Image (cartoon, grey):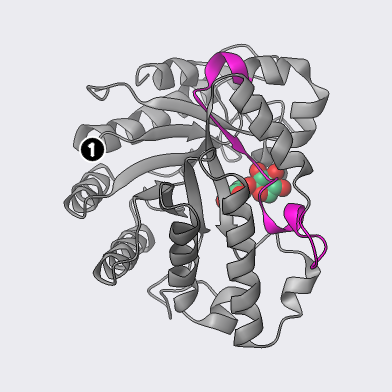
Amino acid sequence: RAASRPVALGSAAEIGAFRGDPRYREALKRYCDIVVPMNDLKWDALRHERAGFDFAGADEIVAFAEANGKALRGHTLLWGEALPPWVGEMTTRAEAERELVRHIEVVVDRYKGRIATWDVVNEVIKYDPTSGGPWRDTVWQHLLGPEHVEIAFRTAARTDPKARLVLNDFHFEERDAGAAARRAVALDICRRLRDKGIPIHGLGMQAHLYAERTIDIDGLQRFMRDLDALGLDVEITELDVIDWKMPADAALRDKRAAALVASFLGAVASAKRPKAIVTWGLTDRYSWVGETFPRKDGARARPLPLDADYRPKPMLAVLERYR
Ligand code: XIL
């Protein structure tokens, strides 16, 4: 069933398509309440030089969102990927802390009062926390230890006290031991931040859904209730469907994708209304899914609510039920 109150819908915006394809911008205007720069707030976009910041791409998307009355999410202040080479050359704890703090201060301050919500940290939970977790082995974990998460949240909160701060991660929704362990770890991180008085407002579920896997309805509902008990919001931050193992038939894939999204959102919303539902792109014309999960038959991936010619797919109707 749909949530009782409307949910803001949105999409990530990829800068190449955004600049080059007017239909892409029209689709963002038409279908989104929220826009997220897909790659332009990542370190490798902003910080190709250690000394300075390059806000060109992010500024364009932020300006577009503001001109069209869209809310913004910021993705992301700390991640173990999409880093410029110089980050890997840091050797000391003091250096890493200094760079991380300065980065977050400058970026959050620039968009203070404009980017309302930040994915403060992205993918900090180890893929399989049952084997030597819970932290993912990144340059930040390596140099700063588990404290990297606290430093990031503290700095973001200090720089923009009104911003909503989110812990964003993936693989929470499946019926397997890994996902169950990841949910427990996420709750634990949130609880610890809370106990230390460090602000955190929400948990972001990326929700890159694998078409061949099963949603853990009960597990998700429990997770929602646990988040609720902690006073945290939940946001769906990068929804799409990875359909590389599905049969070729496009109509069948679209139907399966819509059903999967319906079952996922249904499980979430029956226990707790999400604060936002954001897809990782809008049209099958541009998506990371086909590049990262290429199909053996060479057919185009169909992960998103609009097809490659911007025609609405069944998934769009599922999303619109929540709006
Ligand atoms: C992806 C983008 O969609 C691609 O354009 C880019 O080349 C790589 O990153 N989880 C995340 C996102 O948190 O930032 C990733 O985005 C997809 C997986």
Magenta residues? 28-53
Residue at 43%, 44% in the rendered image: 213
Residue at 49% x, 56% y: name it.
120
In the structure shown, which secondary structural element does the residue marked by tag 1 occupy?
loop
**Is residue 132 highlighted in magenta?**
no
Q: Which picture quadrant has residue 59?
A: top right
Q: What is the three-letter code of the residue carrying label 1?
A: Lys
Work out whether residue 215 can be spotted. Answer: no
> Does residue 106 sit above or below 308 in this rendering?
below
Which residue was labeled with disc 1? 272
Which quadrant is home to the C terminus?
top left
Query: Residue placed at 33% from the left, 65% from the top?
Result: 181
Q: Quadrant of residue 31?
A: top right
In this picture, is 57 found above or below 252? below
Toward the viewer: 75 or 226? 75
Mark 1 close to ligand 1, CB under 8 Å: no
Give the percent coordinates (x, y) of residue 47.
76, 59
Residue 127 in picture, x, y percent from top left? 48, 65
Whether 203 is drawn above or below 17: the answer is below
Seen at 43% across and 70% down, the residue is: 150
